[in-house]
Amino acid sequence: RSVTSDLDRDSISEYACQRRTTLKNYNQKFTDAFEILAENYEFNENKGFCTAFRRAASVLKCLPFTIVQVHDIEGVPWMGKQVKGIIEDIIEEGESSKVKAVLDNENYRSVKLFTSVFGVGLKTSDKWYRMGLRTLEEVKRDKNLKLTRMQKAGFLHYDDLTSCVSKAEADAASLIVQDVVWKIVPNAIVTIAGGFRRGKQTGHDVDFLITVPGSKQEEEELLHTVIDIWKKQELLLYYDLIESTFEDTKLPSRKVDALDHFQKCFAILKVHKEREDKGNSIRSKAFSEEEIKDWKAIRVDLVVVPFEQYAFALLGWTGSTQFERDLRRYATHEKKMMLDNHALYDKTKKIFLNAASEEEIFAHLGLDYLEPWERNA
Ligand code: TTP
Ligand code: MN
Ligand code: MN
Ligand code: MN
């Protein structure tokens, strides 16, 4: 390997916000393995190892070449002893026995299965596992279990919600959201955030930010009206509306994984499919009305953002999660600043730093700007 690539590896930052990470991943064999191990550590509440493997996966996603020998990772940050061991196993054997053991582990498999249901988190999964339950059929059969409204929706729409949302479906959902929002507030800005903004072709949900330039009044009622209209149109399969808890005297939250304080709605939307066989009477006659399900249940997150916080919300809701964690860690440790989805606070100068765009936030932090598609860390 050339001297240049050695130098390149030495200059890779320990922070994802200083690495350009596109969707082109030359080391998926390794990053998939690390993410399975990280997830298993998360299930077992081993935060240290979980973070170590998440960071290792994240950093390998920015390498412009495939790792073929151990020498290739010299100088790359976050390559600890454990991580190196897994890399060696995969280089030598083509796979890692530790990863295989996790994938075969009964607890991992059950928790993975249970948490695939919308509304089921680690706490519920653990409980079900300790009750001896192992399959979704067993959970559904257990009449003593009290399912939440969210979990009931999760089981009801399980197949739709576990099949990936395509770009076309995200665009269809986008039209539905824009249509209703613009009917209520014509000058509202509706933006897709999350994975689709980073250029992903599929996702587990569609994330929308909604803001109204120069208004406060209209904002508060907006989501309520959206919900009322969608109910009448019978497009809402599930929703949970969370009111804003923001106080503008508060400093940005230190906790990286804390939820933000925006008014938001976690919903399941009925998105009608594009009919390819429109007007094809032979096909239509072959099926009765009930047999054709011409819609798909799609998870959408709607977030209403005060206009002056829009840049911070957009930066926070675009992700990736690992990028966001490192951005906040960088702000705290390298700049003595506090960043969250609402604001940026300079602890040295004791002032809030305003921003009208993501570019301005990067500039405040002394960071080169990364485009959304370069944030797939
Ligand atoms: P997700 O929708 O969970 O993730 P994603 O869009 O990157 O990937 P997927 O295709 O699986 O949907 O979250 C998007 C971003 O929103 C992520 O960076 C975390 C952030 N987020 C918040 O900032 N606050 C919140 O309350 C939630 C739920 C998410
Ligand atoms: Mn998303
Ligand atoms: Mn989301
Ligand atoms: Mn620290």
Image: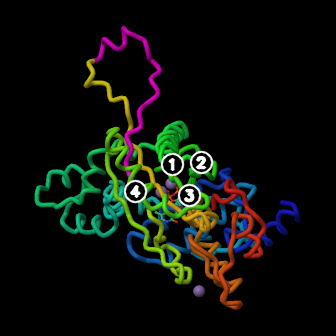
Spatial CA span between label 4 and label 1: 15 Å
Mark 1 residue CB less than 8 A from any atom of ligand 1: yes
Q: Which residues are magenta?
A: 266-287
Q: Which residue is mark 3?
A: 211
Q: Which mark is residue 266?
A: 4
149 with respect to 269 (left or right): left
Q: Which mark sits nearer the N-terminus, 4 or 3?
A: 3
**Secondary structure type for disc 3:** strand
Residue under the point 52% across and 83% down = 250
Spatial CA span between label 2 and label 1: 7 Å
Is the C-beta separation of discs 4 and 3 under 8 Å?
no
78 up-or-down from 98: above or below: below
217 with respect to 116 (left or right): right
Mark 4 residue CB less than 8 A from any atom of ligand 1: yes
Spatial CA span between label 4 and label 2: 21 Å
- Within 10 Å of disc 1 (Cα), the crowding (few <14, some 14-19, many 20+) is some
Spatial CA span between label 4 and label 3: 17 Å
